[in-house]
Image (cartoon, helix red, strand yellow):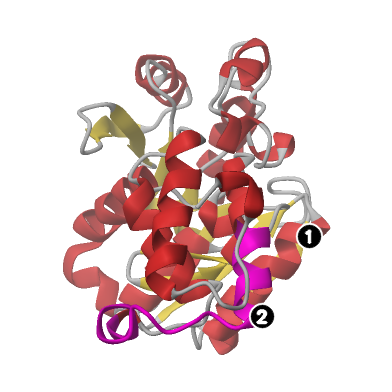
Amino acid sequence: MSRRHGLGAATSRAEALAWLAETFGAAGIEEPKREARLALCHAGGFAAASLIAEPERSLGEPAAARLTEFAARRAAGEPFSKIAGRREFWGLTLIVSPEVLDPRPETETLVEAALKILGARRRNPLRILDLGVGSGAILCALLTECPMAQGLGVDASPAAVAVASRNIEACGLAGRADIRLGSWTEGVEGPFDLIVSNPPYVPSAEIDTLAREVRDFDPRLALDGGADGLDAYRTILPAAASLLSPGGRLIVEVGAGQGGAVLGLAARLGFVHAETRRDLAGIDRVVIGERP
């Protein structure tokens, strides 16, 4: 089957799977066969087991049209999650949109660090602040794991506030979280036991060098960290120092090679026990500081 012809109502599921894998492979997408199976299940509306049990069954016109559109968008570089409108993070299925940063697996390093630091305290009443809440992924994960905690998420994007609010509700956390529109800590009153953030940290000049899935489909507001990528930290860390309760922790995600600079800033602001934690790739991914 030629790539340019797309799919028709009479196309079998097996033929569609092969065409999708060929299309994705030609577009340079990693694991094209895996993505083809996922596309058939999501856009085609088929259960995974049916692809094995009924490979010769025809798609039908609605599924063929949905799959053809899905394939065109994915081949153009649009992330699978943005087309599907959802993303898995920390075992949660979250809503995503073009207006929010796709939650990344490496960001789970921040959640892991927070839970390890909290230890048994995660069962106690806590106040958690998420600055630049985006999709709400971090806040949803932490509130799910900390059943007595109350959360506040702040974002400068009205669209992100809407997405985060939907995710809070979908995760059954609506009674324990407030999502607000604002610039960082503007109008926020402490104290908080934990402040977290995955701020924009890509140096402005490097944005055009990012993978197209990121460069073209994640919002620039969530990527651009200024000339050296550190602008957001210069705002977040001083504010956190005044909003944390004594012994409270600040945990921020950082880009590759930025850990030392953010650690230095934390030390100058009086944070103690400052340290970094590495992600699964061995990159310093989060910086942690404690208010004395």
Q: Which residue is mark 2?
A: 61
Classify mark 1: residues with Cα within 10 Å, few (<14), some (14-19) or many (20+).
Answer: some
Under circle 2, the secondary element is helix
- Residue situated in front as seen by the camera: 70 or 101: 70
Q: Which residue is mark 1?
A: 159
Residue 3 to residue 142: above or below: above
Q: Residue at x 59, y 66 (%)?
A: 67
Q: Residue 282 at x, y = what percent?
A: 20, 28
Image side of residue 185 versus residue 291, left or right: right
Image side of residue 15 versus residue 162, left or right: left
Q: In which quadrant of the rendered view does residue 125 lie?
A: bottom left
Q: Looking at the image, can residue 219 be seen?
A: yes
Q: Looking at the image, can residue 101 be seen?
A: no
Q: Residue 63 at x, y = what percent?
A: 60, 78
Q: Which residues are magenta?
A: 49-70
Q: Quick check: is 52 in the magenta stretch?
A: yes
Q: Residue at x 33, y 53 (%)?
A: 33
- Residue situated in front as seen by the camera: 105 or 197: 105
If the image is split into quadrants, where does the C terminus sit?
A: top left
Mark 2 or mark 1, which has the lower sequence index? 2
Q: Residue at x 52, y 72 (%)?
A: 11
Q: Residue at x 47, y 55 (%)?
A: 20
Q: In which quadrant of the rendered view does residue 235 lie?
A: top right
Which mark, by number, is residue 72? none
As shown in the figure, which amino acid type bears the numbered disc 2? Glu
Number of numbered discs visible in the structure rendering: 2
